[in-house]
Amino acid sequence: MKIFSSEEIKAIRQFSLKEQGLTLRQFIETVGEALALEIITSIIPGHRLVVFAGPDLNGAYALTTARYLALQGLRPEVFLFNIGGNRATADCCAARDRFRQDCGTELLNEVTGLQFSMPDLQQDVTVIDGLFGTERTTPLSGGYQSIVRYINEMKPRVVSLDVPSGLLVDSVDALINRNIIHATITLAIGFPRVVFFMKENAELLGNWKVVPVDYSATATERAPWKYRIVEKTDIQHLIHPRPAFASKADCGNAILFAGSYGMLGAAVLCARGALRGGAGKVTVHSPRAGFFVLQNAVPCALYESDPGDVAITNIELKREYKSVAIGPGIGTADVTIDALDSFLKIANANSRPLVLDADALNCISIRPSMLNHIPVMSILTPHAGEFDRLFGRQPSSYARLLKAIEVAQQRHVIIILKGHYTAIVRPDGKVYFNPTGNAALATGGTGDVLTGLLAAFIAQDMRPEFAAIAAPYIHGLAGEIASREHGIFGVTASDVADCIGRAIMTITETT
């Protein structure tokens, strides 16, 4: 699913109306009916319905939604804010007049003055928030700010139409959360918005859902896009059933530079991720302290000893490997930083993409000059803290995402910015949000499993830009499968690795 900006959605809507021979008011009718049907499915018996409608397009949606709810026998109490009596757009006025025509005047309160009495929102109330949608481009102020703060203070159940009022969907400006509606449910019209995927907005959006709208398929296909959500069909194009006569030589070989004294578990988990991901042969290069641990914990992997006893002191390829991953648990000792620095220069000269994770990124943050030697199309997998150490502290998730886009384009690398909605940022400026996974993945070592899975997919001849999309999706599915067995709190990184095969099966099996 593509994610568009407000202007892009407006262009799609205009094209769709022209193609389908509809007016905007007819479109508002269809949207209002769809929103009402969605709201009816989640109504809590006994709750009063209070609708707040603004003077623009979102207000027209809210008024039309309220009319359909009233025609279904519900009795929404509607407040239309038309300060001065002349602020409402023609389409909003038309929706108001249609409401009066079909439902009478008893339920509709049109607020034209600066003073009015707010309804009681303290008990058993569902508020339908239709004050402002994506048409709002500046923070709320004055009376609207007061209305939003009152709603938030009363804490009713809130259903926001399109976006919570006050949330700016195309801006990175820092906003004050108490001046934005805190929704219980957000019903996005037609498409999600990029701000839905930012951590800071979770408390504002509540549970969000896209309400389908009959936009033109031609317009949607042709419209330029920067963001999209990864879907199962995308992964099905990338992962195929294994041929019956496949051998381990056909499934690629990967080498993992991982582990140090006290952090050998990271090497174990990374190796398990690579093995469960289908790599034909997996070699783990680790210090001598890792020999017994790795041979016992992952006997299916080969062990290659580093000259160092407790830390990796030498990173080089003694034979040809299809994929190389560096980082899980290697620590940040000076000898390890030196080894990584030397290897990056060689890999860069040979234009060899790498997977760089965890302590590899921490080593680079200590010696930033190494950024200049990362080979093109390498995959970096930072979480927020690692990213900020590398590229500077960012004030918000949105700002961090924009910085990641800038870095990916400048350095021609792929950045997997890990989080609830992991963002895969490509060198062409495109961003893919991964929808799989849950809070079960919030445990140590799951990132190491992901690194191994990335190495496995690249070893099997998947291009880095595709592996960066497929691996987080499968990794998230594995977390979901593990949580069904162990519960959200009980999942360990080993459980996630063990469920990778089943996650891949849900993609490759046919019905």
Image (cartoon, helix red, strand yellow):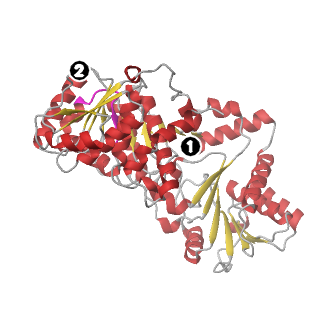
Q: Which residues are magenta?
A: 373-382
When the figure is inspected, residue 372 is found, relative to residue 28, above or below; the finding is above
Question: Residue 54 versus residue 194: which sits nearer the camera?
Answer: 194
**Which x, y percent locates residue 39?**
72, 61
Question: Residue 431 versus residue 143: which sits nearer the camera?
Answer: 431
- What amino acid is found at the position of numbered circle 1 in the picture? Ser
When the figure is inspected, residue 404 is found, relative to residue 92, above or below; the finding is above
Label count reads: 2
Q: Residue at x 36, y 35 (%)?
A: 274
**Which x, y percent locates residue 470?**
47, 35
According to the picture, the residue beneath numbered tag 2 turns out to be: 319
**Which x, y percent locates residue 273?**
37, 39
Q: Does residue 190 appear in this view?
A: yes
**Residue 374 on the magenta span:** yes
**Which x, y percent locates residue 499?**
46, 44
**Residue 233 on the magenta span:** no
Q: Secondary structure at mark 1?
A: loop
Indicate the quadrant containing the C terminus: top left, top right, bottom left or bottom right.
top right
Question: Residue 434 versus residue 405: which sits nearer the camera?
Answer: 434
Numbered label attached to residue 5: 1
Please rate how many residues cluster around mark 1, counting C-alpha atoms within 10 Å: few if below 14, some from 14 to 19, many from 20: some
Q: Using the rendered view, name the quadrant where residue 268 is placed.
A: top left
- What amino acid is found at the position of numbered circle 2 in the picture? Arg
Q: Earlier in the sequence, mark 2 or mark 1?
A: 1
